[in-house]
Image (cartoon, helix red, strand yellow):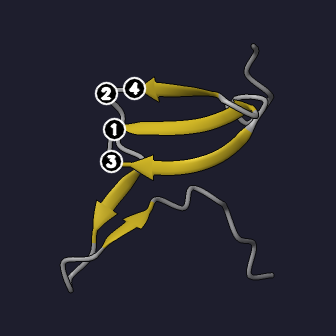
Amino acid sequence: MSLSENNDLNGTLIDEKKFSKTYQIAENRFMTIITNIPNTFTNADGIEEKIDNTLINDN
């Protein structure tokens, strides 16, 4: 199992929480990556949202 260029595991992302991501890597196999870097934030309405690190060029 390896990480791709965008640091996602080769598999299907099935769950993302503040400090973990779970991937389905085979029919009955899953892998959870735990990190100290948050994947989500709580917005002003108290809803957990994914952090979007995408850079947008408005030009």
Packing grade of label 1 (10 A; few <14, some 14-19, many >=20) is few
Q: Nearer the viewer, residue 52 or 50?
A: 50
Please say if the residues under marks 1 and 3 sit with CB atoms less than 8 Å apart.
yes
In the rendered view, tell whether residue 31 sits above or below residue 24: above
Q: Secondary structure at mark 3?
A: loop
State the residue position of label 4. Answer: 34
Q: Nearer the viewer, mark 1 or mark 2?
A: 1
- In the image, taking residue 27 as reference, residue 52 lies left or right, namely left
Earlier-in-chain disc, 4 versus 3: 3
**Residue 52's x, y, as percent?**
54, 61
State the residue position of label 1. Answer: 19
In the rendered view, tell whether residue 47 sits above or below residue 35: below
Residue 36 is labelled as 2
Please say if the residues under marks 1 and 2 sit with CB atoms less than 8 Å apart.
yes
- In the image, taking residue 42 as reference, residue 49 lies left or right, namely right
Q: Secondary structure at mark 2?
A: loop
Residue 18 is labelled as 3
